[in-house]
Image (cartoon, helix red, strand yellow):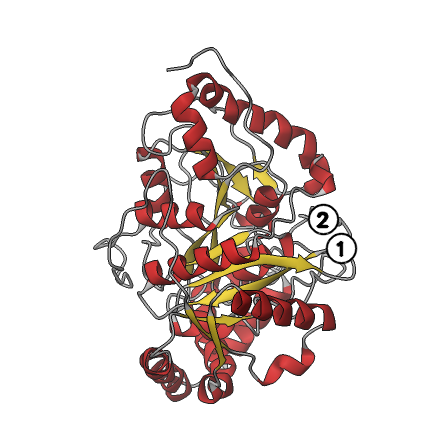
Amino acid sequence: MSDGITTPPKAGAGVFDLLRQFRKDEAAADRYAAACLEKAKAIEPQLKAFEVLPTDTRRRPGPLSGIPVAIKDIIATSDMPTTNGSPIYRDHIPANDAWVVERLRQLGATIFGKTVTTEFAWRHPGPTVNPWNAEHTPGGSSSGSAAVVAAGLVPLALGSQTLGSVIRPAAFNGIVGFKPSYGAIPRIGVHPLSSSLDHVGFFARRVDDVALALSLLAATSDRDPHGRPVPAFQVDPERGVEPLARPRLGIVRFDKWSRVEAEQQKTFEGTIEKLRASGAVVEELVLAELDRVNWQAIVTILESEGAHLFAELVARYPDRTSDHLKSLVTNGKAISAPDYLAAKASQEQRRVALGHEMKGFDALLTLPAFGEAPRGLHYTGGAGYCAPWTFVGAPAVTLPAGLGKSGLPLGIQIVGDYRNDLRLLRAAKWVEIALSFDPGIPRIAA
């Protein structure tokens, strides 16, 4: 019960911070989502991150009571439009919530509107800007979800990743992004792009926040044939996940390292030095075969499955689909069945191989992107450092680690073995503590 003290939560407070405060101060919980809505309305003309804002922010009972969660607009909501980033679906209101939205409602979360996505989570961007600098992309395809968490409008948002659509925008916006293992969260009601690659993921401000989200949302469903259960775990409501003691980390650079921006290289090397100084065992690890095969194989799978999914739509609505989507269909139709099956076989082989190659390591340390968010809104950034882990379905976390020459965030990526999500999160928590870097709330949100 409230003791009469109603101190408002700090800007950019995380899920754990808020839940702790709400337990002590129910009045703060009652007002928090409404205050988030007022702030979102004030900033939205600049940020352009929402397709739809909520009309009802009343608190519901449950373990996430009082927590507003923004939903990427390829994820179905039965009480507001789900546009999929396409004019074809501009006024579409689904009959049912997506599985993950229904589960969030059961947990007491406040469904806080729909966030801008690229068209069908592919390459054609929406209007969202990077809250750190409106002349730069927020990344994609989960553009709006990353931006609203970075701007301090909500503490948690849902996104999806098929190449790099959670990890890369999280890095560009200076927040935590988490792509769980493939199949960890049912995708029922999430518009597909590639059934072999699509993941549901999270944006937040702390590792504990995304760990809590996975602990509450990980599941399987008979309606999702691609579900792969991850071992269940609980998160301590006061302390969060327990960080690993002195983790052993493998450094993965890949051949594309030479194309990484100088400031991103410097941030990465500085991170390695800090982690070693804090007690981690950090060693170089070469994954040459994964580096060699992952990009062509993942593109083959994505384009082939995407063409099957969107060919009829493009033919029916040529004036309402982008050149990006048309190219996806054209390229996918040109892929032969043997090439597709070979790429799928390679995917499974590399997934199994990664488990062997990671023996002796708790997690891998690599990059989430080639540098700062690119200038302009037409290009959402390269996914070369995200694709290998999406390809094999390995869990991945990105953490903010520094600022680049333009004052935009730079991150690092930590990767775990397939279905060993908790160990990855424990390693990421240790790294987060060792780095102790928080870029804060960007000026657009002031």
Residue type, mark 2 in image: Trp
Q: Is residue 341 above or below residue 426?
A: below
Left or right for 158, reference 128: left
Residue at 51% from the left image edge and 26% from the top image edge: 33
Q: Which corner quadrant of the image does residue 262 belong to?
A: bottom right
Q: How many neighbours does mark 2 have within 10 angstroms: few (below 14), some (14-19), or many (20 or more)?
A: many
Q: Residue at x 48, y 88 (%)?
A: 288
User: What residue is shown with label 1?
Assistant: 407
Seen from the viewer's position, the closer of residues 332 and 296 is 296
Of the pair 192 and 19, the residue shown nearer to us: 19
Please give the label number shown on residue 225: none
Circle 2 is placed at which residue position? Answer: 132
Up-down: is 422 above or below 364?
above
Label count reads 2
Task: State the CA–CA distance, disc 1 to disc 2.
Answer: 8 Å
Q: Where the C terminus falls, by quadrant?
A: top right
Helix, strand, or loop for circle 1? loop
* Above or below, comparing residue 57 to residue 444 in the picture: above
Question: From the image, which quarter does the N terminus lie in?
Answer: top left
Examine the rendering and report whether any part of residue 415 can be seen: yes
Horizontal side of residue 25 vs 143, given as left or right = left
State whether residue 166 appears in this view: no
Q: Residue 307: x, y in percent?
A: 47, 71
Residue drawn 57% across and 64% down? Answer: 412
